[in-house]
Amino acid sequence: MDKQAPPISATLLKSPTGITGLDEITGGGLPSGRPTLVCGSAGCGKTMLAIEFLVRGATQFGEPGVFMMFEENAQELTDNVRSLGFDLDELVGQKKIVLDHVHIERSEIEETGEYDLEGLFIRLGHAIDSIGAKRVVLDTVEALFAGLPNHAILRAELRRLFRWLKDRGMTAVITGEKGEASITRYGLEEYVADCVITLDHRVAEQICTRRLRVVKYRGTAHGTNEYPFIIGKRGLSVLPITSIQLDHKASSDRIPTGIARLDDMLGGKGVYRGSSVLISGAPGTGKSSIGAKFADTACRRGERAILFAYEESPEQLLRNMRSVGIDLAPWVKKGLLQIHSSRPTMHGLEQHLVMMHDTVLAFQPSVVVVDPISNLTLDDTEAEVKPTLMRLIDFLKKLQITSVFTSLTTGGNAPEDSQIGVSSLMDTWLLLRNVEFNGERNRLISVLKSRGMAHSNQVREFLMSDAGIDLRDVYLGGDRVLTGTARVAQETQERAAAELRQEDHARKLRQLAAKRKALDAQIAALVAEGEAEEAEVNFAIAQETMQTNTTQQNSDAMGHLRGGNTTEGNSLTKGKR
Amino acid sequence: MNTQATQTKQPETPTAPSFELRLYVAGQTAKSLTAFANLKRICETHLAGQYRIEVIDLTKTPALAAGDQIFAVPTLVRRLPEPIKKIIGDLSNEERVLVGLDVQPVGETA
């Protein structure tokens, strides 16, 4: 339980009601040992609140209780609350609860002279003593006003009754009919001044919502807002939504969306665990499929997921998702996935939220997909929708549940405008668009925002086929984004152009090679010519040297022959000359 | 005085009394004493010999309160003849008591 209203003092004890959410609003329950007035119009759930207070007290908090009823009889009440899972017969048998029906039939009663309601006191006292009760419910004490003509006596006696209950230390719930000008028709609030709770059953746009408000609670802080509540299968459930504070933890854990290229766009890892994702788009852009894929991926990881579908029945959803390669049926069978389908018009938005609240608490999923929220908000003004959605998102964040909301955008406005009300609550916003061009419609996806991560600024084409969901790069042609066949055409065109370019390159290379070959040939010819010349020169030199040597040898030989005694040195000198 | 003895006087007819009355009170308060005195007087005047009164003190037998659907005291319950009728208050208005008991006043019929 949330300790958002710390106990003011130790003297003001509170008795927990055990009713989901009510103890949170009242900071611990109803004032112990004091009467609490619960009032509202017919059919608003007064009796249900009262009996749940009593049953929970008897079963969960060890406080037996007396239910004194003035309208229904014990059998009717027992039958009525059996639908909430309360077995009054058993509790009566265990001496945890006493049911006492005070039947007042105006036509049977004649009034003459003075009297008091001591008989009622005695009955109540006897019932309290018989089981050691700590809690008392009087439902609806106002029936006495119809049964007894002398209201002066009655008022005096009621004052005494409430005083008496206080003196006996009973934590009491007194129900009262809503009055025209005052809180209750007969002004019971005059006597019961410690805690007043009003219940309301309002119809707006043909949709009914139950609301609860703590009008006053003497000596303690309490939530003063109106809180929607439902009477569900497990009793009352009040959604104390505005009391939730903005203090949820932020996980740095990332979970993939199940679409690899979408994860790439979201910094490569997907969204943060416990963050909220809005997928908005025009009809038929594939919002539901992304949502279903997200749930599918969670189940693949072995986590639990809930899909709230407000457009399709579970069967229809399963079939349709199978057509885009997402088979959810095994998860449903395994108990990892719950699909809750209901008509948005069945309840008001808040009632839906309370139901989601209940379902989520019961199933403890890690991923919740709401498809779509725009249907829930059908009739409400945006000003009303925002706070209620904020409550849901905060609630989910607090439980570290990743939430995916799809939203249908209307044609008229720019897509960015159409979700002003809720977009600020979302951490990640994916925008899906239909682009009609070149005789066909194609889907585009882009990440409008994604808090706390680098994300792609690129528009991608979003493809759905029986093989699944995939993203493709788009082509920019002129001032347009090209998708579908235009993209394919563009791709072909680019491929052709590339081939042409390649051919051109090859041709140029060939030319170059040929040229180089020619040059090589020229070089070879020149080298050969050079070599030939060199050889010629060498030959001439050799010839000359040979001649010189021959002449020398001749002259030496002639000198030898002529002188005969020439010294060696002379001969050497001469030879060198 | 848990259940007071029957206050019957049957001078002529020994048959069972046709009026069976119960007076619920809470202790010996002024109101309960007044109521009892008033009741006795009215019965003696108009129902002589045909009635039986049982006085139940709820402070002593609180369990009996639920049976006859008592919430106010004093309450006079006409158990017989059927249907059950209830008169709450100290029975100070004789005329209304007679209307409540569905009894014809003696003075007018006789």
Image (spheres, rainbow, N blue to C red):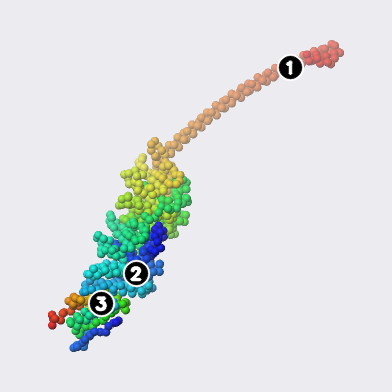
Q: Nearer the viewer, residue A173 or A465?
A: A173
Which residue is labeled 1 in the image?
A545
Q: Subunit of mark 3? A: B
Q: How many marks?
A: 3
Give the distance between the C-alpha atoms of the residues marked 1 and 3, in whole angstroms.
175 Å
Q: A270 above or below A546? A: below
Which residue is labeled 2 in the image?
A167
Instruction: Give the number of the mark in front: 1 or 3.
Output: 3
Label 3: few (<14), some (14–19) or many (≥20) C-alpha neighbours in 10 Å: few
Give the distance between the C-alpha atoms of the residues marked 1 and 2, in whole angstroms.
152 Å
Which residue is labeled 3 in the image?
B30
Q: Residue at x 28, y 68 (%)?
A: A158
Tell me where residue A244 sits by quadrant: bottom left
Instruction: Give the number of the mark in front: 1 or 2.
Output: 2
Residue type at the position of mark 3: Ala
CB contact under 8 Å: marks 1 and 3: no
Give the distance between the C-alpha atoms of the residues marked 3 and 2, in whole angstroms.
25 Å
Q: A395 above or below B51? A: above
Residue type at the position of mark 2: Asp
Where in the figure is residue A410, as x and y percent of width and height?
32, 46
Label 2: few (<14), some (14–19) or many (≥20) C-alpha neighbours in 10 Å: few
What label sits on residue A485 in the rendered view? none
Q: Nearer the viewer, residue A457 or A162?
A: A162
SS of the residue at dot 1? helix
The tag earlier along the polypeptide, 1 or 2, is: 2
Where in the figure is residue A293, as x and y percent of width and height?
42, 51
Instruction: Give the number of the mark in front: 3 or 2.
Output: 3
